[in-house]
Image: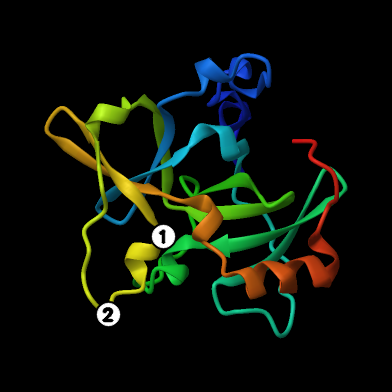
């Protein structure tokens, strides 16, 4: 089990709706295998250690099941499986990044969380376009930090509309827009 560090990884100021400028150009970065990824911090509600996942029948293979997060049932997506990467056993570095997608909370299982990084808009390049590739639809852009490149994901496109509806239909939808 993880210690209290997991909840302290994001500064409380990023949750202020009135102070949206503090969120601009900030990305939560994490690892999947050897590659570094980032997601826009405004979608992240919290980071937790891996915990018991209850498997739910008839879900897409990358939806591992659900967790009970302080009384709220949250579906959990293994991002490695979603990206058709080789699966990896969960360990004490594995994290669940809880994000809001279309007013629904979804947990994203990642290998490890790195940091919140500033990537100015002028340091983000468009994603590579490869004909016939569906995986590039998840990519918002390529963020450059020094000599490193972070693959910036569009969290709204991690689930297809019909998959999001299936999660909503499964009782995982929480109406309203509280984070």
Q: How many marks?
A: 2
Residue at the spot x=41%, y=66% of the render? Answer: 88
Question: Which label number is shown at residue 113?
Answer: none
Residue at the spot x=60%, y=51% of the render? Answer: 50
124 versus 101 height, above or below? above
Relative placement, left or right, of 159 versus 178 is: left
Relative placement, left or right, of 125 versus 14 is: left
**What residue would you read off at disc 1?**
138
- Report how far apart the C-alphas of labels 1 and 2 lie in the structure: 14 Å
Residue situated furthest left in the rendering: 147
Q: Quadrant of the C terminus?
A: top right
**What residue would you read off at disc 2?**
132
155 versus 7 height, above or below? below
Judge depth for marks 1 and 2 and give the one in front. Answer: 2
The image shows residue 45 at horizontal and vertical percentages of 65, 36
Q: Quadrant of residue 144?
A: top left
Say what secondary structure mark 2 lies in: loop
The image shows residue 4 at horizontal and vertical percentages of 63, 27
Residue at the spot x=24%, y=53% of the render? Answer: 34
Say what secondary structure mark 1 lies in: helix
Residue at the spot x=66%, y=54% of the render? Answer: 106
The image shows residue 97 at horizontal and vertical percentages of 57, 45
Q: Nearer the viewer, residue 134 or 179?
A: 134
Q: Is disc 1 in contact with disc 2, using a CB cutoff of under 8 Å?
A: no
178 versus 83 height, above or below? above
Question: Colour scheme of this structure image?
Answer: rainbow
Q: Nearer the viewer, residue 140 or 4?
A: 140
Mark found first going from the N terminus, 1 or 2 = 2
Q: Residues within 10 Å of mark 1 (few under 14, many from 20)?
A: some
Q: Quadrant of the N terminus?
A: top right
Relative placement, left or right, of 7 versus 154 is: right
């Amino acid at each position: 089990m993880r210690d209290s560090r997991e909840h302290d990884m994001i500064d409380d100021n990023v949750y202020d709706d009135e102070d949206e400028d503090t969120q601009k150009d900030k990305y939560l970065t994490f690892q999947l295998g050897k590659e570094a990824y980032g997601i826009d911090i405004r979608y992240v509600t919290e980071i937790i250690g891996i915990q018991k996942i209850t498997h739910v029948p008839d879900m897409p293979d990358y939806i591992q099941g659900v967790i009970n997060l302080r009384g709220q049932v949250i579906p959990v997506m293994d991002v490695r499986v979603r990206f058709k990467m080789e699966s990896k056993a969960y360990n004490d570095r594995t994290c669940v990044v809880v994000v809001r997608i279309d007013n629904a909370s979804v947990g994203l299982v990642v290998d490890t969380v790195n940091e919140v990084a500033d990537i100015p808009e002028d340091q983000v390049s468009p994603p590579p376009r490869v004909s016939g590739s569906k995986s590039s639809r998840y990519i918002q852009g390529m963020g450059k930090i020094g000599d490193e490149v972070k693959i910036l994901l569009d969290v709204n496109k991690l689930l297809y509309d019909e998959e999001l509806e299936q999660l909503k239909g499964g009782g995982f939808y929480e109406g309203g827009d509280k984070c």
